[in-house]
Image (spheres, rainbow, N blue to C red):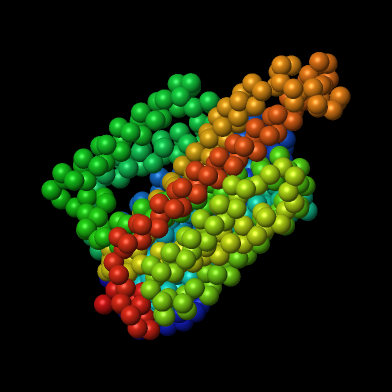
Amino acid sequence: MSTPAAVVQHRGMVTLSLMLATVMQALDTTIANVALPHMQGSLQSSLDQISWVLTSYIVATAIATPLTGWLCMRYGRRQVFLVSVVGFTLASLLCGMSGALWQVVAARVLQGLFGAALVPLSQAVLLDINPKEKVSQAMALWGAGTMVGPILGPLLGGWLTEQANWRWVFFINLPVGALAFYGIARYLPESRPSQERLDLFGFVSLSFAVALLQLFLDRGEHLDWFDATEIRLEAAGAAVALACFVVHTWTTPSESFLNRALLRDRNFVVGNVLMFVVGILLYATLALLPSLLQGLMGYPVQFTGQVIAPRGLATMATMMLVGRLLHYFDARAIMAVGISLVVLSLYQMTRITLDMDSSLFIISGVLQGIGLGLTFVPLSAVTFATLGPNLAVEGTPIFALLRNIGGSIGIAMVQVLLTRGSAQAHHDLSSHVTLSNPAVHELPAALSPSTAEGLAALNAVVSREAMMMSYVGDFQVLLVMALLLLPMLLLLRRSSTGTARVDAVLD
């Protein structure tokens, strides 16, 4: 049983404590990325070995996330939250103290296992403790917290690594974890546990499917995808495990690990599909921009951060404002405007050229940031609007899991398209660089294909143009995906008019 929102005391302190835990976990999703080169030298490991620092955390989080709902019903949300915060904070300490790669990887596994519950559980608690008229503002605050990680993680991680060393990327969690633990222990009311039976087969099959899928997506680029036996085994294993989970869920006569009542709620199903695609758009764009700006445009690391930062700031600012808009406008209309801005920003990115300045990147980034803010918050609220408190606790881990899987698929997808698109564009452009082409003879002497130096310089120019064409192709694919989101909004249940449009469906 949950605590009625009307009788929750110290709601502000509870929210602050929840957000500290959320931000702490969200930051660790990306904060270690920029520290990997420093960790590689300190721990004397290869590039493939050091990548397990990221892979181990991602896989462990994916395995543990679906278990959040059952743990809360079995042991109570307060106890689960406290154990998660303590475990995550101590694991962060172990990461920073590690002297060997295997120790860091083991500690990162613990981080993922304990931290998996923090984001979905904080969303479930905020949905529970806030009255209906404040749900939209609560989701806006929660959304801003979850967006801090992808936005500020690389910037903060780079600053800590340069000013101190890579260990402080993990040590920074200690004071945040301590404050979160104090606030949750003191102010968060306990929910009444129930004797829920764990569907062990459902949990194990889903965990195997998610873990193998994450390994497949994370290591595929390093191992050249299906040319590697490991990748083929991971893909086959994920498919078999997912098939077992689906069949078991639909045929078991008792309660399954995935509550089938969730699948009968139209808003929940459509909302999760939309969030899956939003995850692809969000993380795919974040993966493309740094390599585009640094590797192709030649921007310094610090300037790259300055170009990308307005995008994240626009997202967080919009999220803090959109909660109020939900009281006056239909949630679907707000999301339509948000997705349209994302479409416009991606269209602008399809017009990029090698000789342009940074203004288009900043403008399109701000537009996309506003669009994501206008989409994320209403989507989070509408997805859970028609679910009761107990179902919401079970549904929030699925919501978080699909967003993360969407992000992993988005990153892997654009990497594959970028590599293959660049190779194809290079082949197409090179086919025109022949002595029989009159335009070749008009090239400067430094680019003349008649000398070895000129041919190498010309190949570099062709490679750069081919890579830019491939980036444009990636943004075109993301543009089409964003356009497909618009008609899907019609599948969401219509919210009524009045001063609480999104909350009307809660009645």
- The residue that appears at 26% across and 41% down in the rendered structure is 245
| Residue reaching furthest to the front | 438
- The residue that appears at 56% across and 32% down in the rendered structure is 421
> Where's the C terminus, which quadrant?
bottom left
Q: Position of residue 228 (x, y in %)?
A: 48, 22
Specify whether residue 468 is in view. yes
Q: Quadrant of residue 365?
A: bottom right
Q: Position of residue 339 (x, y in %)?
A: 47, 60
| Residue reaching furthest to the left | 253
Q: Position of residue 171 (x, y in %)?
A: 65, 55
In the image shown, does 75 or 286 lie closer to the viewer?
A: 286
Relative height, residue 110 to residue 263 (above, below):
above
Please state the total of marks drawn on the protein image: 0
Q: Position of residue 96 (x, y in %)?
A: 65, 48
Q: Quadrant of residue 392?
A: bottom left
Specify whether residue 179 is in view. no
- The residue that appears at 36% across and 57% down in the rendered structure is 487
In the image shown, does 225 or 215 lie closer to the viewer?
A: 225
Relative height, residue 332 to residue 163 (above, below):
below
- The residue that appears at 86% across and 24% down in the rendered structure is 445
Report the side of 321 relative to 397 (left or right).
right
Q: Quadrant of residue 426?
A: top right
In the image shown, does 165 or 230 lie closer to the viewer?
A: 230
> Where's the N terminus, which quadrant?
bottom left
